[in-house]
Amino acid sequence: MGQQEKVATSLAGTVSEEISASLTAVDAELARRYPGDPGTRQPVHTVYVPGDVFEPGTLRSWGDQALAALDEHAPDAAAFAAVLGIPEELAGPVHDRVRAKLEREPVEDLRIDFEDGYGPRPDAEEDEAAARAARLVSEAYANGTAAPYMGIRMKCMEAGVRDRGIRTTDVFLTGLMEAGGIPEGLVLTLPKVTYPEQVTAFVQLLEAFEKAHGLDAGRMGFEIQIETSQSILAADGTAAVARMIDAARGRATGLHYGTFDYSACVGVSAAYQASDHPAADHAKAVMQVAAAGTGVRVSDGSTNVLPVGPTDQVHEAWRLHYGLTRRALARAYCQGWDMHPCHLPTRYAAVYAFYREGLEPAAARLAAYVAKAGGDVMDEPATAKALSGYLLRGIDCGALDTAEVARLTGLTRADLDAFASPRRGDLTVTAP
């Protein structure tokens, strides 16, 4: 090779050095505030069970009730697909995977509720229920019957219930420590957050607990539940939810939209309180933008229309839930709440249909990107990241198999992880 021709420039090297020096603080701030997605599994839903109702067999009971509903109201793949409008070519795979999921892992994320679903109780009664919840959660993780994620929703940080919420959290966490320690799948949910200072207060609580037990600082994170208009738009016109993420000091793991409390807060009448109401769309859009790049995930809310009663009524409720779930997935809300065991069939049907119908197009685009083969879509590194994240979510929830994704893309799980979670400033990662 010949000698490389020298390229002419006009600026002294010190200019670049000075610019870099001036942006050092910004670089550090970007890395702190916007680390990107953590690359961990996100559950497709959260199930809430009141603190006095949760039992050792609750998870299995939800799965069994869901299977019984399928047997009664949609006994085969064709019937289930006809109710929900699932394409014929997906009917068998979706139905089979839904049944297998309900048999193997019916609930991905469980919250034992000590807030609205539990209500005010005498202190001694709630103490006992919180201690019992800790014992049952510890036993579930020890004997292999736990959901991948489990935890509690305590009462909020408002004055009337603050002390009770703090005490319930303390009793529950202390019980976990006495039973063997904090499980990896622990999730805490702080409800009805209105001011960032309430998030700061919960951080203070967790810091004090970690220090008291010699735990690593930051060991425990928590979700922030968005149920008031003030958490979206503060009195000074700023997006309070963005300040809440910052106030969590790296501990926030999720933002959960509370469909009914938020709707009531902005004056939506009961008949129109739903996750597809324009007020809900606005709130979730603000949450989504505030959380983007921070590593904090956004969860949709729930429907209170239960699939119970005669078959026609169950089918109508199933179609509603299926449609709302598909709508949320298309808007990148990959998690929601389920309020009843009979919501599980349509939760998984919607999720599985979403990922299976997009499997081949997504895999082909990603394979073309890796091979630089082009095609009819010119994708960029950020799109490769989104495609990999889509396939990984499908694998994690059981909609897709690692082997079929590898066959279609030529990529391993590690390759997909590398594309889906590149380091900041490194969106040019290529598979080996």
Image (tube, rainbow, N blue to C red):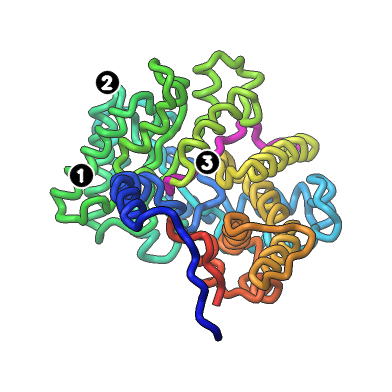
Residue 119 rendering spot, x and y as whole percentages? 39, 27
Q: x%, y% of residue 217?
A: 21, 52
Tell me the kind of residue under disc 3.
Ser
Report how far apart the C-alphas of labels 1 and 2 lie in the structure: 21 Å
Q: Is residue 47 above or below residue 197?
A: below
Q: Is residue 296 magenta?
A: yes
Residue at coordinates 15% horizontally, 49% vertically from top-left? 211
Q: What is the total number of numbered labels drawn onto the structure image?
A: 3
Please give the residue where the numbered disc 1 appears in the rendered image. 207
Mark 1–mark 2 contact, CB under 8 Å?
A: no
Would you say residue 106 is visible in this rendering? Answer: yes
Left or right, 142 with reference to 390 = left
Q: Where is residue 224 drawn, in percent x and y? A: 40, 36
Which residue position holds label 3? 299
- The residue lying at 34 percent from left, 37 percent from top is 246
**Sequence order check: which comes first, mark 3 or mark 1?**
1
Kind of residue at disc 2:
Ala
Residue type highlighted by circle 1 = Glu
Instruction: Answer whether residue 405 is magenta in the image.
Output: no
**Circle number at residue 159:** 2
Figure check: 6 above or below 283: below
Image quarter hosting the N terminus = bottom right
Position of 73 compared to 63: left or right?
right
Secondary element under disc 1, as helix, strand or loop, is helix
Which residue does the image show at 13% across and 49% down from the upper left? 212
* Classed neighbour count for the residue bearing mark 3: other residues with Cα under 10 Å, few (<14), some (14–19), many (≥20): many
Q: Give the number of the mark in front: 3 or 2.
A: 3
- Residue 269 % position (x, y): 61, 15
The quarter in which the C terminus is drawn is bottom right
